[in-house]
Image (tube, helix red, strand yellow):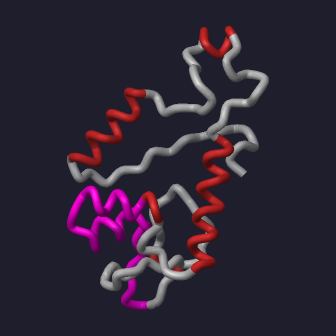
Amino acid sequence: SSGQAAGWEWSRTKPSCAPPTDDVCHVGETLTTYQQHCKEVIKGKAEAKEAVRTFKLVEGTPVRAEMDKLLQLTMKRMQIPADVKFTKEAEAAGIKGSSYNMFPTLFHLVANLQRGNRIFAVIFRSFGADHE
C-alpha cells in the first residue's frame, strides 16, 4: 500500500515475517505491512490496534479471507497437542493451559522496542516442518 489511501491492499506476495521488499510494486510505490499502514493512517493508538486486530482497513473480501485463513492457521499451530496438554511433564516445563505463549522476557523486549519506535524483526527459527 502507498499509505495514502484509507484502505490497505495486499501485494499478492506470500505472507512472510520479513519486511516487505519493493521489488514487487510499481515505480513510485512503497510497500508497508498492514500494521505499519494502520499506524500511519489512524492517529489514535487504540483505534490503530483495533484496525490491526479486525483487518478493518483491508480492501476486498478475498484478501480478508486470506488473512483470516492465515490467522486461523497460526492459532491452530499455537495449540499444545492434546497428548501433552495438562500433563505432569507439561506443567513441570512451565506449560500451563492449552496454547503456547511467548516468553515474558521476549514479550517485554518487543514491547520496549515498539515503545521506542525502533525498527526491528524477531526471527523464530524452527528446524521442523511446523512452519510450512
What percent of the width, then of the height, locates residue 103? 46, 28
Going 21% across and 47% down the picture, which residue do you hit? 116
In this view of the protein, which residue sits in the foreground, 106 or 79?
79
Q: Who's the residue at 26% across and 51% down the image? A: 118
Residue at 28% x, 48% y: name it: 114
Q: Quadrant of residue 100?
A: top right
**Looking at the magenta stretch, what is its main secondary structure?**
helix
Q: Residue at x 62, y 49 (%)?
A: 74
Q: Position of residue 80 (x, y in %)?
A: 67, 31
Q: Position of residue 12 (x, y in %)?
A: 60, 77
Q: Say whether residue 44 is magenta.
A: yes
Left/right placement of residue 95 relative to residue 132 reads: left
The quarter holding residue 88 reads top right
Decide: is 7 above or below 64: below
- Residue 100 vs residue 127, the one in the foreground: 100
45 in magenta: yes
Query: Which stretch is magenta?
Result: 27-52
Furthest toward the bottom, the residue is 27
Quadrant housing the N terminus: bottom left
- In this view, the residue farthest toward the right is 83
Label count reads 0
- Residue 125 x, y percent position in the rendering: 59, 40
Q: Nearer the viewer, residue 110 or 59?
A: 59
Q: Is residue 61 above or below residue 36?
A: below
